[in-house]
Amino acid sequence: MQTQEPIVYQGQFGSFTIEDHDRQGVILYRSGLAIAALSFAIATGFAFLHNTFWITPLYFVFWTALGVSLFTIHIYLKPLHLALQAFWMIGGLASIALLFVSSEPFALYVYQHPIWIFGIGFTFAALTGIFFKEAFCFDRFETKLLTPIVPGLLLGHLSGLLPLLWEQVLLISWAALFVVFAVRKLIQPIPPDIGDKSVFEYLKQKHS
C-alpha cells in the first residue's frame, strides 16, 4: 500500500511538516472547548430554571475541559501560555476552596458573595485569553464579542453596577457565542490551529 507523502509547509524560519501528534493535540484542544462550551451552556440553562444544584458539577466539567484546551493550545508566546495555565490553576484552587467554605450551591454562593470572583475569576480570565488569541489569529466575530463580554459581566456583577436584566442578557450571549465558537472550531481545518512550527522551533532554540 502506498503511503501518502507528508505535506511540507514553508514557515517564517524554515520548512516543517505536520505530524500525527500535532493533529491529536488540535483535536484535544477543540474537544476541550466543545465540552467546556456545552457544560457552560447547560449550566446557564439551569441557572435560569433556578436549579443551582447541577451547576456545581457542570462547572468542574467546564474547568477540567478548559484545562485540557489550555495545555494543548498552540501559542507562540510561552510566557503568555504559562500565564493562562496559571490563571486556570488559581481559579480551580479557589473553586475547590469555596466548596469547603459554604454548604450552599456553588453558583448561588458566588452570586451572593461576588468577592469570590477575585478567586474563581482567574478561570474565566484564562478563558478570555483563549478568546482573545482566537480573535487575534482568526478574526472570529464571536470571540471579538466574547473577549469584552466575559470580564464585563464578571466585573459588572462584582461592582454591582450591572442591572439584573443586563447580567442575564450578557450571560445568555456568553453561552450562545461560546457554543458558536466551539462548533466553528470543530469544522475548521486543522493546520491553522497548529500554526507555524518553525516559529516554535526558533523560539525554543533562542531560549535554550
Image (spheres, rainbow, N blue to C red):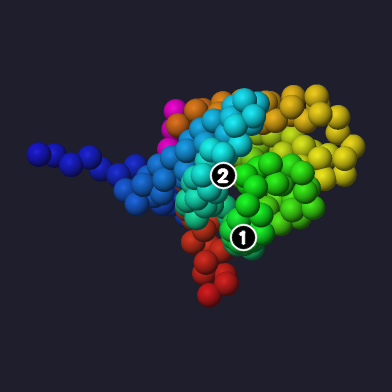
The image's mark for residue 133 is: none
Instruction: Give x and y (percent) for residue 12.
Output: 54, 51
Give the number of the mark in front: 1 or 2: 1
Q: Which mark is residue 100?
A: 1
State the image coordinates of residue 168 (x, y, percent, origin top left): 74, 27
- Identified at 70% across, 30% down, the residue is 171
Give percent across and percent down for residue 142: 65, 28
Q: CA distance from mark 1 to mark 2?
A: 13 Å
| Residue 177 placement: quadrant | top right
Residue 205 sits above or below residue 140 on the image: below
Boundaries of the magenta span: 187-191
Position of 200 with respect to 135 (left or right) is left
Question: Which residue is nearer to you in this view: 58 or 180?
Answer: 58
Q: Which residue is mark 2?
A: 56
Whichever of labels 1 and 2 marks the residue nearer the N terminus, that label is 2
Q: Secondary structure at mark 1?
A: helix
